[in-house]
Amino acid sequence: MSLKKWADNGWLKKYVTNRDEIANLLAIVERDLKDAGEEELSPDWRFGIAYNAALKLCNILLYARGYRASHGAHHYRPIAALPLILGEGKAKDSKYLEACRVKRNIVEYDYVGAVTEEEVIEIRGFTDNFKRDVITWLAAHYPELTSNF
């Protein structure tokens, strides 16, 4: 399926972004990665913060392509769109982030202590690498959105 088909199904909406918005979202990613390293916070919170940074990166990709998720699936759709934007080679990353989304929901709404320190380290490392991939992709495909960073 394509992003256009997703939009035709009502799962995405057309959206126009700009370099200031992208720069601000990247600043949020930086803040969240830093905050996810604050050891006085619980692993549950640190995991959720790092997950938020990864979600912002997925949104950046979607925004650059001219879409945003429709209400009701604003976490799920950007993650699921990852292989549609960056290629099928990123399907494993999309599945990993989907598992993180589910875990984040559990610790946010249902259960305390479900995240280990190792999982926090893993998602922080993943997100830091993913950030580099997103910035490289933006520079190659949408350089007009990268002039503020």
Image: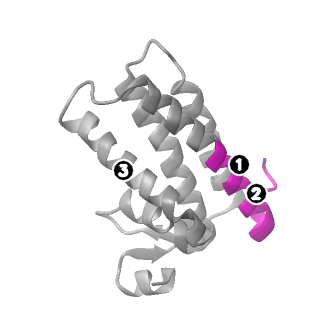
Measure the C-alpha gap from mark 3 to mark 2: 25 Å
Q: Which amino acid type is marked by label 1?
A: Arg
In the displayed orientation, state which residue is furthest to the left.
110
Mark toward the start of the polypeptide (3 vs 2): 3
SS state under label 1? helix
Measure the C-alpha gap from mark 1 to mark 2: 6 Å
Horizontal side, residue 119 vs residue 15: left or right: left
68 or 141: nearer the viewer: 141
SS state under label 2? helix
Q: What residue is disc 3 on?
A: 99
What span is colored magenta in the figure? Answer: 129-149
* Residue 102 x, y percent position in the rendering: 30, 48
Horizontal side, residue 62 vs residue 22: left or right: left
Q: What residue is disc 1 on?
A: 132
Q: Residue at x 59, y 67 (%)?
A: 89
Q: Report the label total.
A: 3
Measure the C-alpha gap from mark 1 to mark 3: 21 Å
Q: Is residue 20 at all visible to an observer of this figure? A: no
* Main SS category, magenta section: helix
